[in-house]
């Protein structure tokens, strides 16, 4: 490939060459850049492959928003290649972004710092630092970009593929205690697309140029091991698509193969397409024969993984419940979700009472929101850990009625639901939470059992947060259908926000307090909605239950609510039911 170098000033380049349709460019760091360098960025054009960038000084992302009418909510951070010396900015960056946009995928082209130009103390840190930061920013600003924070992938080419696979194996779920909000977000990609990637620092098939630029001529065994990503794969490495050509003389196909084998070993979903010819750095591989099929294969893979469906996926968990109508209430919940037009619903049933739970391992990560209509035996430890990770890294969770009775000793679960009742809950589990007549939240640490209700009756639900996306626009009070009015729930109640209460009247066997009915809880980056309503089938058919549940599902999945309020809304004067 002729490597012609046209140096031009940034201004010239902007006026003459900016054909790209990016919506905005955002710097990765708004304050001091860690490991900051004194370089002055260079941009030039190489034939029809477009712009090259070297000496990156200020790392940033160019944002390519998917057209609204076809937007899928999926997004991808693209790392162009260039041997950790340059960035093939258009060839493996902006042109890919435009292609993703046509599929309804929002793309962020990452201008990461290039190890080759960096000081010895920073060169192995900057690229990964920038990629991690980019992922966190995308998730933090998900609402603004109208993307789904649990469908953020990474794509990388060649050395950019090394960066993408490094990010896929060296990530964290965010630090919930971090001072800076952005650091509280996970930097784990939800999927990886690796194009003729450098994977290994192995001396027999690794890419020596990338290695030299990243970790120098004489790296220690530790450094080599750390950046040999096939050795860093775990069960948490995201699902991965690998594309490579057998005749790649620059980055040997063994790089993809060893990564694929490592993914298989850890049961990470993966696909690999190896073409006989195509060489290296082929981008869309136009006119290169069979390898030009890869975009189709990539699209099919994304489709199969549910990344291109406009609908989000919800999972309802059922199978045990002290409420014997659970086989009737799950279909009501499922129908209310599908009626939004936003969700496809799967239902998973646990083994029945007392049976072995060993094989109960739902793939939570495939869902935007998980709804529990479950109150029963404990799950396997591995499933519990998986569920905690799913929620804390941004997954949505909804607890329905008696689901807040379950798992009294599972600490993280009780953090998620905020408060719960029955099954041995007492002052050891946290305070009682309720409101007094002034609308003040009371955290009552007095001893006593958690969880109680009076006799079933119709009661008034009072909205306490009128601007939250779930409750906004709903009348301040609605008469709720016959239900159990839960009272005396208690729990850790951290990050708990009360959306609605109901007055628990002593005349019906209640507490004389305003008890929380609808709540939200932040658990890590995850959003939890807790409704105590829904004892009877008719309690769930109540319009107030239905609307708040439907909106909560969208909110838990995405952080915002776009579904309009129906024409008929709940009323304080009469019980209204939703159509089914
Ligand atoms: Zn009940």
Image: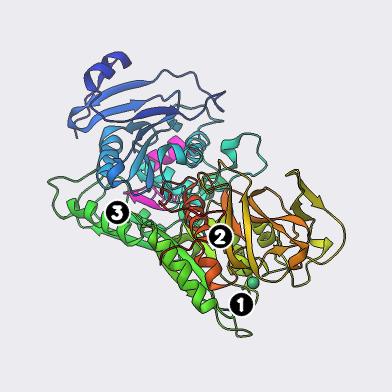
Q: Quadrant of ligand 1?
A: bottom right
Q: Secondary structure at mark 3?
A: strand
Left or right relative to 187: residue 563: left
The way the protein has been coloured in the rendering is: rainbow
Image coordinates for residue 498, horizontal then vertical, percent: 65, 49
Q: Is residue 412 above or below residue 454?
A: above
Viewer-closest of 279 and 353: 353
Residue 519 shows in this picture? no
In front: mark 1 or mark 2?
Answer: 1
Image location of residue 139, percent across then percent down = 49, 42
Q: Is mark 2 within 8 Å of ligand 1?
A: no
What range is drawn magenta here?
A: 191-215
Residue 513: image tag? none
Q: Is residue 109 above or below residue 399?
A: above
> Which residue is at the front of the view, 56 or 535?
535
Q: Earlier in the sequence, mark 1 or mark 2?
A: 1
Q: Nearer the viewer, residue 357 or 45?
A: 357
The Cα–Cα distance between marks 1 and 2, rounded to whole angstroms, is: 17 Å
Sequence-first disc among 3 and 2: 3
Q: Residue at x 29, y 54 (%)?
A: 243
- The x and y percentages for residue 38 are 49, 18
Residue linked to disc 1: 323
Q: Which mark is residue 243?
A: 3
Residue under the image location 55 percent in, 52 percent down: 393
338 w.r.t. 320: above or below: above
**Cβ atoms under marks 1 and 2 closer than 8 Å:** no
In this view, the mark in front (3 or 2) = 2
Q: Is mark 1 within 8 Å of ligand 1?
A: yes
Q: Quadrant of the N terminus?
A: top left
- Distance between the alpha carbons at the discs numbered 3 and 2: 38 Å
The disc label shown at residue 398, or none: 2
């Amino acid at each position: 490939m002729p490597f012609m170098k046209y140096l031009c000033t940034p201004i010239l380049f902007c006026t003459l060459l900016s054909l790209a349709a990016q919506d905005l460019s955002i710097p990765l760091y708004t304050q001091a850049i860690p490991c900051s360098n004194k370089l002055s960025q260079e941009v030039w054009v190489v034939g029809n492959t477009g712009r090259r960038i070297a000496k990156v000084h200020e790392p940033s992302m160019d944002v390519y928003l998917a057209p609204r009418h076809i937007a899928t909510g999926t997004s991808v951070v693209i790392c162009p290649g260039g041997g950790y010396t340059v960035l093939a900015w258009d060839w493996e960056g902006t042109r890919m972004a435009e292609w993703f946009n046509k599929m309804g995928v929002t793309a962020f082209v990452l201008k990461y710092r290039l190890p080759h130009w960096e000081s010895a103390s920073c060169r192995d840190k900057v690229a990964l630092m920038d990629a991690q930061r980019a992922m966190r920013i995308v998730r933090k600003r998900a609402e603004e970009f109208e993307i789904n924070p649990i469908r953020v992938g990474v794509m990388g080419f060649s050395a950019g593929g090394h960066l993408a696979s490094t990010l896929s194996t060296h990530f964290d779920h965010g630090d919930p205690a971090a001072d800076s909000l952005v650091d509280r977000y996970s930097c784990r990609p939800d999927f990886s697309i690796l194009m003729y990637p450098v994977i290994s620092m192995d001396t027999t098939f690794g890419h020596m140029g990338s290695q030299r630029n990243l970790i120098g001529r004489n790296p220690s065994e530790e450094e080599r091991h750390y950046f040999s990503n096939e050795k860093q794969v775990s069960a948490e490495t995201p699902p991965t698509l690998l594309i490579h050509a057998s005749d790649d003389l620059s980055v040997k196909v063994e790089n993809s193969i060893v990564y694929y084998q490592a993914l298989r070993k850890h049961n990470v979903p993966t696909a690999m397409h190896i073409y006989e010819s195509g060489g290296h750095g082929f981008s869309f591989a136009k006119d290169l024969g069979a390898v030009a099929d890869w975009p189709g294969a990539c699209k099919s893979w994304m489709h199969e993984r549910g990344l291109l469906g406009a609908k989000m996926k919800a999972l309802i968990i059922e199978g045990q419940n002290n409420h014997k109508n659970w086989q009737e209430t799950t279909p009501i919940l499922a129908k209310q979700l599908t009626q939004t037009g936003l969700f496809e619903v799967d239902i998973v049933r646990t083994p029945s009472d007392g049976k072995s739970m060993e094989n109960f391992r739902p793939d939570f990560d495939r869902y935007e929101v998980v709804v529990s209509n479950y109150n029963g035996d404990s799950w396997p430890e591995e499933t519990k850990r998986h569920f905690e990770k799913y929620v804390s890294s941004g997954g949505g969770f909804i607890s329905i009625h008696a689901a807040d009775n379950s798992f009294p000793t599972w600490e993280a679960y009780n953090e998620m639901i905020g408060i719960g009742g029955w099954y041995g809950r007492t002052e050891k589990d946290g305070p009682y939470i309720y409101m007094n007549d002034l609308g003040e939240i009371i955290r009552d640490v007095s001893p006593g059992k958690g969880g109680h209700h009076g006799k079933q009756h119709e009661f008034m639900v009072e909205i306490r947060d009128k601007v939250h996306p779930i409750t906004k626009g709903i009348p301040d009070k609605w008469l709720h259908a016959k239900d159990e009015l839960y009272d005396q729930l208690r729990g850790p109640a951290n990050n708990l926000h009360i959306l609605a209460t109901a007055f628990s009247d002593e005349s019906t066997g209640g507490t004389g307090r305003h008890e929380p009915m609808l709540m939200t809880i932040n658990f890590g980056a995850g959003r939890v909605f807790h409704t105590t309503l829904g004892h009877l089938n008719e309690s769930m058919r109540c319009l107030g239950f239905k609307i708040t549940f439907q909106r909560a599902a969208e909110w838990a999945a995405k952080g915002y609510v776009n579904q309009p309020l129906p024409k008929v809304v709940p009323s304080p004067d009469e019980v209204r039911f939703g159509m089914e």
